[in-house]
Structure formats: C-alpha cells, structure tokens
Amino acid sequence: TVAFSACLASGVSAQSLTVGFSQIGSESGWRAAETTVTKQEAEKRGIDLKFADAQQKQENQIKAIRGFIAQGVDAILVAPVVATGWEAVLKEAKEEEIPVILLDRQIEAPEDLYLTAVTSDQVHEGKVAGEWLVKDVGDKECNVVELQGTTGSSPAINRKKGFEEAIAGHDNIKITRSQTGDFTRTKGKEVMESFIKAEGGEQDICAVYAHNDDMAVGAIQAIKEAGLKPGSEIKIVSIDAVPDIFKAMADGEANATVELTPNMAGPAFDALEAYLNDKKEPPKWIQTESKLYTAADDPMKVYESKKDLGY
Ligand code: GYE
C-alpha cells in the first residue's frame, strides 16, 4: 500500500503542476498570441496556469511574482518587461526553491537566479533585418528611421545593436532618427508622424526599421496618411512575422520581417517537466529560430498558416 500510494502521489503531483505566469501585457499582436499559446500549452499538459497581466509595468510583475511565491506555486514563468531590476525578487523565489523560467526577453542578473530563458537571438534578428536592407538598397544613399521597442527591454537593446552591426561599413546607409514606439501600433504611428513632420516636406526617409511589426503597421498608416507610399517610396523592415504584416506585404506596403515564434511556452514547459520529474538541468538559454520573410514569399499563404499559432 505504501509503495502504491507513493507512486500515486508522485503521479498526481506530476499531473497537476501549478505555474504562475507573469505576462508583460498586450502591447502587440505577437504578445497576444504568446499569451494564447501559453494558455493552450498549459491546458494540453494539465498544468494549472495562474495568469497575471502586468500592463507593461515592472512593479506589477514583481508584485505578481511575490503573489505566486506566497501561493507556493511549483514554478514561475516571467516575460520580463525590462532587462534590469530583477535580482531581489528572483532571490526570493530561489529561497523558496521555486524555479523561474524567462520567456522571450533576457535579463541582466546572475544565471543561477533562473532555470532557463526561452528566447530568440535578438541581436541576430536585428542583423538579419539590417542585412536585408543592405542588400536591398545596394549603393544607393539610404536614410533609415528606427522605431525602437520598449526602452530598457532586451529586444530593444539587442535589435538595435544587431541592425547597427549589419549596416556598419555601409556608409550609404545611415540611421537619421531613432525613437521608442514602445512596441505598440499607436505609438509607432505617432512617432512616424513626428519623423515625417520633422522632415519638413523635404521627405528624405528611405526606410523604416521597426523593432516589431505592430510599430511597422502603425508607421505604414502614418506614411499613407502623409500621401507617401510605404513598401516602395519608403521601405519597411521589421520583426515578429504577425499576420497583419503579411497582409501589408501582399498589398505591397511592407517588405521584410523576421519571424519570432509565439510558442515560447512549449519549450519552457518541456524543460520544466524534465527538471521537476527527472532532475534534468536545462541549458541556460533555449534559443528559438529566426527566419526572414520577404514580399516574395507568398505572403497570403503565410498569413493563412499563421492562424493556428495563437493569432
Ligand atoms: O517582438 C514584440 C513584443 O519580447 C521579443 O515583445 C518580444 C517582443 C516582441 O511586444 O512584439
């Protein structure tokens, strides 16, 4: 009986993990898809997911994480809005032996404070976007305006860096304006309007580099309202590969995007289950793929295929 109930007990605990998820918010289409996929993955695996939306604020995330610790969850997923300021709360989780997995953004903290991070290589994404532009413009002069992601977030820092690395040494390509659009459509549009206005009618913007597709979609809107042609007069390159950017590509209004999978939770839960059930330590970084899509890649077909991915 003892062996039987022990076996039953461990079987039950493996089936009914409780995991807290501190999500950033719903700033982008990609973010909403990640939330959907995470909930679906949890349900598939019989994981009880406690979901907390931080509305873009780190203080809300820290509060949510403390709440999860107090509830005694088995593990915590966190998509960290900014890269710094996590050490204290992660130490609290560690003291309670609650493993923490980072989703989609990296942090600046000692590695022993989290189990693993499931993210793309964001420097590489920026590089892929920049290399696409280098090839596309050839020897022409090209002034680029940049829409940055959330200030202090790892994707904003790294996507800027990677793009700058790609255009370094190509003196015909310059970033002439760069500002944050906070990864949202609304701010992407606003900032692009101010960029166009600052040109004072002597429009000299050859390309927009947006750290995500949502800001690019906002910029496309601003460009059209200014009577200019996105995709041809002003090239558009961005990151995420959300369905709407493929629609824009099909309409000739966007040019290239770098794909980011919204399924960060699948690999995260795999690593967590292997760790809790079999004591298997995952690598500190589980890297997702980045693939370039251009308008030549049958955008409406890609658009259709995105529907099953939480979009
Ligand atoms: O690209 C953007 C989102 O953290 C890498 O956050 C992620 C980024 C993603 O809001 O759309």
Image: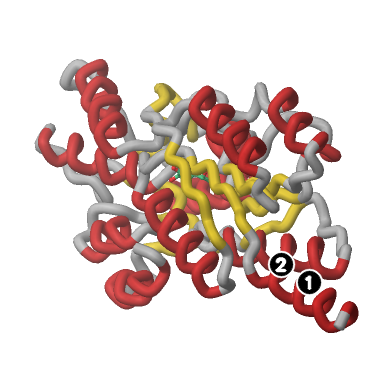
Give the Cα distance between marks 2 and 1.
5 Å
**Tag on residue 243?**
none
Q: Position of residue 53 (x, y in %)?
A: 43, 40
Q: Is residue 156 above or below residue 251?
A: above
Q: Residue at x 66, y 24 (%)?
A: 84
Establish if 246 lies above or below 87: below
* Res. 174 in view: yes
Corner quadrant of residue 275 = bottom right
**Amino acid on which the number 2 mark rests in the picture:** Ser
Q: Quadrant of residue 198?
A: top left
How would you rate the neighbour count of disc 2 (Cα within 10 Å): few for under 14, some for 14-19, many for 20 or more? few
Residue 215 vs residue 261: left or right? left
In this picture, is 263 found above or below 4? above
* Whether label 2 touches label 1, CB < 8 Å: yes
In the structure shown, which secondary structural element does the residue marked by tag 2 occupy?
helix
Q: In this figure, which residue is indicated by the disc labeled 1?
A: 10
Query: If the image is split into quadrants, where does the C terminus sit?
Result: bottom left
Q: Which of the labelled discs sits on residue 13, or is there none?
A: 2
Give the residue displayed 52% in from the left and 23% down from the top: 59
